[in-house]
């Protein structure tokens, strides 16, 4: 921890460091994969097979990983400050489940991707409001009620998704399966641009509120005593977070727990000032997911299986035990 | 003297349940007002009304001649600060970061704390004797330490009015005494109007120039300690016999619940 308050120098230094880490992660993920790729050759010769692999397989995948990691981590930070609870995560709270349900409905109706994203955004927002409303009792938001509501909401959404899945064509069912496991399979640049636009808009809105997230993290009434219009703040955060979560889920499906453990790790190292925590988590989360996807692509590729693990499987395998650690660690004192 | 608060027929209900009824009183600049009354009589609600975070269901509250509901939250937070009763902070902020948040009502959207904001915050921490743990994790401080940090945060807002909700409830005797001394000093040295919700009748009689005694959402008595703290009034309001006497050293009255 740092006795001096956040200075611009520290802000700039930390974020440039993380940006460099992100660049390194991207370079690494472009160079490695099913096999080592000669980036110079791929760049120089547009007729080479390397060129096709780089630009039609790896680059879109890395870009998507970057955007999704960025969105999930900053979305996690926003949820945690809003709900005043370091355990909050869009996946655990069921908001991602709601967005997935919206996407699945839109996919099965055969809508174009921009519409799928928009439907996912609306259903993320609706799920968030619904979960918030269900979990709230007498003006309070008890954390166990909130987590339980998320679990039930997820189960309900998944049941509906499976129901829809049994009605649709084989091709659509395949798409739905990818949404459920969470994957960064190569997508068209057009779709990536749409998602990136949604995420950037949501992030800018969140970043405008980063200083206010500090006040909100102290609790509703303290935030009001310190001059925050809590209701207005909440509406903006709900909107921005849903925008980001809806857009990423509609393209990459359910990649869980990233919003939980990335902000936690960043907080341990950099403290809780959201003006730094928010952008730092976004960059670190982006680098993390790019590398996690590299691992997911390569772990089994040299083996007899000759296959790739969806990255959502990998993050859940890391995130599940991490959640248990958060619950059991002594310093949580049962107070969260 | 300037009138800070003027309440006119103020009532507040939660879901049709009346909490405060027909309040009409004024608070003038530099008064040190104690708010007394049994649990659940609406004392904390009164502080939230005065802070402007709860609008009254009926009646008008004016702060410095202007209706409180016409102030933006930020404007109000530059005039009135609150030491809340219970605060759980779940995030690893340092004590200094928490105090610096007292400067939030003065900061623009992209403005960061200036050296002056830092100096004001450190001065507030010096005053409440918590500068020594400025860089400690707020979650790991004891109740008394945390209370002093939160008081420093309220002072960093540079308020004209300080509202305190049972500032000594979680403190041991030594820290209670420190908070009392500090409040008296703040009142003497600064242009502060203090409104303190209290359970400690003896302190109220010693420190507060004026007491508001509440029962069941109504103002039962308003005046100096001698006028308000009559044995029969206290017995009626608190529903128990109260022993009182005069302290041999200070010459001020003290109060104890009568035990069988």
Image (cartoon, coloured by chain):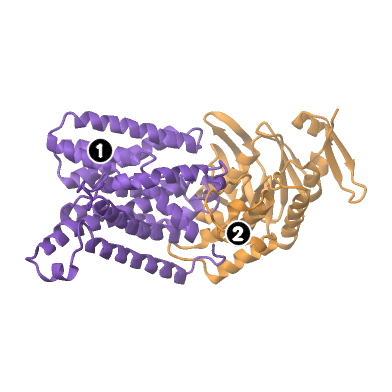
How much space separates mark 2 and mark 1, taking CA atoms? 45 Å
Residue B16 sits above or below residue A203 on the image: above
Based on the displayed image, in which of its 4 quarters is residue A87 positioned? top left
Residue shown at the point (24%, 45%) measured from the top left: A250
Q: Quadrant of the C terminus of chain B?
A: top right
User: Residue B67: x percent and y percent?
Assistant: 54, 49
Instruction: Name the residue nearer the viewer: B16 or A191.
Output: A191
User: Residue A186: x percent and y percent?
Assistant: 18, 52
Residue farthest front in this picture: A304
Residue shown at the point (61%, 56%) measured from the top left: B154
The chain that appears purple in the image is A
- Residue that badge 2 annotates: B136
Instruction: Name the residue nearer the viewer: A139 or A52.
Output: A52
Secondary element at tag 2:
loop
Instruction: Name the residue nearer the viewer: A114 or A292.
Output: A292
User: Residue B108: x percent and y percent?
Assistant: 46, 63
Work out whether residue A21 can be spotted: yes
User: Residue A122: x percent and y percent?
Assistant: 28, 41
Disc number for residue A157:
none
- Residue that badge 1 annotates: A102
């Amino acid at each position: 921890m740092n006795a001096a308050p956040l200075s611009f120098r520290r802000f700039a230094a930390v974020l440039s460091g993380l940006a460099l880490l992100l660049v390194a992660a991207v370079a690494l993920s472009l160079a490695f994969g099913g096999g080592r790729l000669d980036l110079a050759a791929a760049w120089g010769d547009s007729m080479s097979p390397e060129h096709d692999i780089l630009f039609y397989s790896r680059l879109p995948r890395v870009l998507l990983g970057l955007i999704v990691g960025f969105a999930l981590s900053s979305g996690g930070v926003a949820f945690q400050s809003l709900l005043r609870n370091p355990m909050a995560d869009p996946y655990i709270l069921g908001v991602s489940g709601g967005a997935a349900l919206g996407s699945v409905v839109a996919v099965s109706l055969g809508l174009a991707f921009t519409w799928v994203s928009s439907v996912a955004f609306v259903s993320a927002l609706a799920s968030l409001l619904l979960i918030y409303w269900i979990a709230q009792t007498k003006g309070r938001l008890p954390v166990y009620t909130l987590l339980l509501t998320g679990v039930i909401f997820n189960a309900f959404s998944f049941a509906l998704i499976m129901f829809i899945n049994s009605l649709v064509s084989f091709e659509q069912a395949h798409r739905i399966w990818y949404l459920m496991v969470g994957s960064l399979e190569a997508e068209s640049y057009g779709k990536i641009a749409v998602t990136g636009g949604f995420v950037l808009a949501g992030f800018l809105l969140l970043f405008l509120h980063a200083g206010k997230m500090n006040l909100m993290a102290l609790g509703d009434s303290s935030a009001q005593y310190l001059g925050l219009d809590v209701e207005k703040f909440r509406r903006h955060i709900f909107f921005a977070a849903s925008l980001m979560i809806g857009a990423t889920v509609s393209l990459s499906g359910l990649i869980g727990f990233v919003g939980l453990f990335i902000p936690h790790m960043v907080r341990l190292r950099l403290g809780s000032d959201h003006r730094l925590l928010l952008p730092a988590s976004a960059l670190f989360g982006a680098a993390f997911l790019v590398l996690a996807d590299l691992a997911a692509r390569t772990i089994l590729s040299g083996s007899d299986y000759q296959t790739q693990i969806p990255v959502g499987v990998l993050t859940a395998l890391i995130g599940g035990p991490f959640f248990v650690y958060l619950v059991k660690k002594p310093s949580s004192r049962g107070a969260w | 003297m300037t009138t800070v608060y003027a309440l006119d027929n103020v009532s507040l209900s939660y879901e049709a349940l009346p909490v405060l009824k027909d309040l009409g009183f004024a608070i003038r600049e530099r008064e040190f007002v104690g708010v007394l009354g049994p649990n659940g009589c609406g004392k904390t609600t009164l502080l939230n009304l005065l802070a402007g975070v709860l609008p009254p269901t009926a009646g008008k509250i004016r702060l410095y001649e202007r209706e409180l509901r016409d102030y933006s939250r930020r404007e109000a937070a530059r005039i009135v600060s609150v030491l809340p009763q219970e605060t759980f902070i779940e995030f690893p902020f340092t004590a200094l970061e928490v105090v610096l948040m007292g400067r939030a009502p003065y900061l623009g959207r992209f403005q960061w704390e200036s050296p002056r904001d830092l100096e004001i915050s450190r001065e507030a921490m010096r005053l409440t004797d918590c500068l020594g743990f400025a860089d400690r994790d707020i979650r790991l401080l004891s109740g008394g330490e945390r209370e002093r940090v939160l008081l420093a945060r309220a002072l960093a807002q540079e308020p004209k009015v300080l509202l305190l909700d049972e500032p000594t409830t979680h403190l041991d005797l030594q820290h209670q005494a420190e908070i009392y001394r500090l409040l008296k000093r703040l009142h003497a040295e600064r242009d502060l109007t203090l409104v303190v919700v209290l359970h400690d009748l003896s302190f109220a009689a010693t420190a507060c120039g004026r007491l508001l005694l509440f029962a069941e959402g109504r103002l039962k008595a308003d005046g100096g300690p001698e006028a308000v703290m009559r044995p029969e009034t206290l017995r009626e309001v608190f529903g128990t016999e109260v022993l009182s006497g005069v302290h041999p050293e200070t010459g001020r009255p003290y109060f104890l619940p009568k035990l069988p």
